[in-house]
Image (cartoon, rainbow, N blue to C red):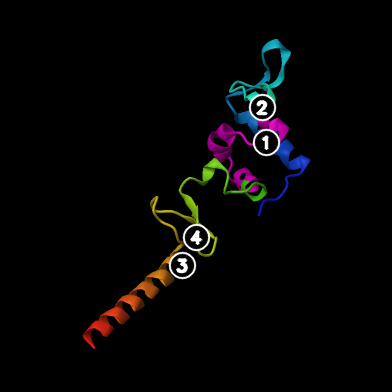
Amino acid sequence: MSQEATAKEYALFFRFARDNCCNYSPKGPLGKKHYCWLEPKETNGLCVIQCGKHCRWFVGAVLPLDKALEAEWRRVHDPNVLPWTKGQRTCCVCGKRFPSGNNRQLRCADCAKARRREQVMKRVRRHRLKKG
């Protein structure tokens, strides 16, 4: 489902973060290089994109500026765990990703149609048994 990014791809992501992210600084306090002002604790202030990890700010605010790069990021990373999948769900029947119209929707359009057809057949069958 998820593919591993190459060093070249991460360099591309980092270059984009370096050029467009408002939290990135080439030099931070005490001479730290590639400093992130959000100060992620696990990297001691280092930009997490430089380390090859997820940054919620980068994914949610910076990455949508370049649709091609965002598609590449999606190809490399698992869409089930990233925050940009807001409004997207995984179908409980077939496992396909689909845009969700509301927070109660569980099935993609095809599976929902098949389920509705089954429910109608069941209801009509019960109705016929009562009449007959």
Q: Secondary structure at mark 1?
A: loop
Q: Which residue is mark 3?
A: 111
CA distance separating discs 2 and 1: 10 Å
- Of tags 2 and 1, the one toward the viewer is 2
- Crowding at label 3, few (<14), some or many (≥20) Cα neighbours within 10 Å? some
C-alpha gap between disc 3 and disc 1: 35 Å
- Disc 4: which residue: 92
Q: Determine the secondary structure under disc 4.
A: loop
Kind of residue at disc 3: Cys
Question: Given contact means CB atoms under 8 Å apart, are the residues at marks 4 and 2 in contact?
Answer: no
What is the x, y in percent for residue 7? 77, 40
Which amino acid does the dot numbered 4 rest on? Cys
Callout 2 crowding tier (Cα within 10 Å): few <14, some 14–19, many ≥20: few
State whether the magenta stretch is mostly helix, strand or loop.
helix
The picture places residue 87, in percent across and down from the top left corner, at 45, 48
Q: Mark 1 = which residue?
A: 53
Residue on which the image places disc 2: 42
Neighbour tally class for label 4: few under 14, some 14-19, many 20 plus, Cα within 10 Å: few
Disc 4 from disc 3: Cα separation = 9 Å
Residue 56 visible, this angle: yes
Mark 1 is on which residue type?
Lys
